[in-house]
Amino acid sequence: MRDIIIFLGPPGAGKGTQAKQLSTDKKFCHISTGEMLRAAVATGNELGMRVKSVLDSGQLVSDDLMIELVKQRMRETDCREGVILDGFPRTVVQAEALNKSLASSSEKITAVIMFEVLEDTVRERLSDRAKKEGRSDDSAEVQLERIRVYQTKTAPLIDFYKKSGQLQAVSAAAEIPEVYKLLKAALKY
């Protein structure tokens, strides 16, 4: 049975960085909903333009669209060994839909990792990333909105997964290699 790991944490916590490293080491599929959505924007088509307006405002794309995109991606052949979900689920509705979808194929979540980091560190990382990568969803105005949206819509997932006994916290305040060691220890890899 494949491993299915969820990475939770605020924007800028390092979920994507750690997911890329783990997916390389374990030959797991890294599903980054942020990258999927930015790719949609890059197409310039109607869907991409709708997604861009949502991302630029700092809001979340609808649950229905995200659920369908992730379910479809998880069926692809490169996801057979394992899956790291980076940026999904973002709401309790998405988490419940994921559980239902996994149960229908006799699968379940292996682990949920919560990357803990102070808000000041998040803001600093997002500012640095905006300068280096030129991402419109990391601008100062959008940063504040993304943090607010995370606190109101995504943070309830912490309690959701804590109640299931699946949540494990990892400090994301250290340097990247140290966080990776903590991650591997939490996952017992």
Image (spheres, rainbow, N blue to C red):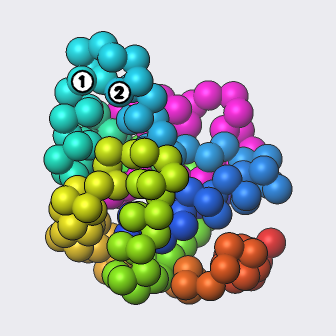
Three-letter code for the amino acid on which mark 2 is drawn: Val
Q: Is 20 placed left or right of 114 in the picture?
A: right
- Which residue is found at the position 17% from the left and 47% from the top? 57
Q: Is residue 161 visible?
A: no
Q: Is residue 162 above or below residue 42?
A: below
As for residue 91 lying within the magenta part, the answer is yes
Give how far across and how far down residue 144 sits, in percent. Answer: 21, 67
Residue at 51% over, 52% down: 132
Q: Earlier in the sequence, mark 1 or mark 2?
A: 2
Question: What residue is shown at x 34% (from left), y 40% (from top)?
Answer: 67
Query: Which residue matches tag 2?
Result: 41
Q: Nearer the viewer, residue 62 or 120?
A: 120
Q: Position of residue 110 (x, y in %)?
A: 61, 64
Is residue 165 one of those drawn in magenta? no
Gap between marks 1 and 2, in whole Å?
A: 6 Å
Q: Position of residue 37 (x, y in %)?
A: 38, 35
Task: Give residue 49's mark.
Answer: 1
In front of the other: 71 or 12: 12
* Helix, strand or loop under label 1: helix
Q: Position of residue 13 (x, y in %)?
A: 48, 71
Q: Quadrant of the C terminus?
A: bottom right
Is 8 situated left or right of 28 in this image? left
Q: Secondary structure at mark 2?
A: helix
Q: Are marks 1 and 2 in contact (CB under 8 Å)?
A: yes
Residue depicted at 35% across the width and 27% down the height: 41
Q: Residues within 10 Å of mark 2 (few under 14, many from 20)?
A: some
What numbered label is drawn on residue 24?
none
Type of amino acid at the residue the image marks with label 1: Met
Residue 20 visible from this viewpoint = yes
- Total number of numbered labels? 2
**Residue 157 position (above or below residue 36):** below
Magenta stretch bounds: 68-95
